[in-house]
Amino acid sequence: MDNLKILIVEDDPTTCTLLRTTLEMDGYQAGVAHNVEHDDIFSLLNEQRPHILFLDYHLGPDDTLKYLIAIRGDADWQHLPVLMASAIDRSQECLEAGATSFVLKPFNWDELTRIIDEICKQILKREV
């Protein structure tokens, strides 16, 4: 897992710090981005080259489904696992838009770890 990178796109600095610390303690590499504009999502992905994208449903006043839809429509990134999160249950619309999984805030850390581990197992199976 040391070589699997998770990019956290979240506008709350406290949540970013908690996620990054927890993920790094679990052996993952973690990158963080606080502000992303629609046009910048691919620049960010190409720069960071993550194996998993952790995407908050809300960044400021905007929802991020448009990023997810753009990612799913891009030949280079369409298979990137995207784990979305929100304090409001948006699981149905996120999954319908192409999210790999959804997690509700505040996080149940055991559930979050289980979901990420499962996604990583799928990634490693594809690479074999």
Image: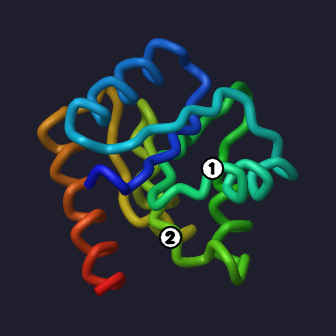
Q: On screen, 44 above or below 59?
A: below
Q: Give the amino acid type for the residue marked by disc 1 in the picture.
A: Gln
Residue pointed to by mark 2: 96
Position of residue 119 in the picture relative to residue 89 (left or right): left
Q: Residue furthest right?
A: 39
Total residue callouts = 2
Question: Which residue is at a point 56% across and 32% down the rendered structure image?
Answer: 32
Q: Position of residue 49 (x, y in %)?
A: 60, 58
* Residue located farthest toward the left when viewing the structure as drawn: 110
Instruction: Please state which amino acid type lies under the numbered disc 2.
Output: Glu
- Residue 104 position, x and y percent, is 33, 38
The mark that comes first in sequence, 1 or 2, is: 1
* Nearer to the camera, 104 or 30: 30
Kindly state the secondary structure of the residue where label 2 is placed: helix
Query: Residue at left 70%, top 83%?
Result: 75
Query: What crowding class fits label 2: few (fewer than 14 Cα within 10 Å), some (14-19), or many (20 or more)?
Result: few
From the viewer's perspective, tell me whether residue 21 is left or right of residue 68.
Answer: left
Residue at position x 44%, y 38% from top?
30
- Quarter of the image where one finds residue 46: bottom right
Q: Which residue is mark 1?
A: 48
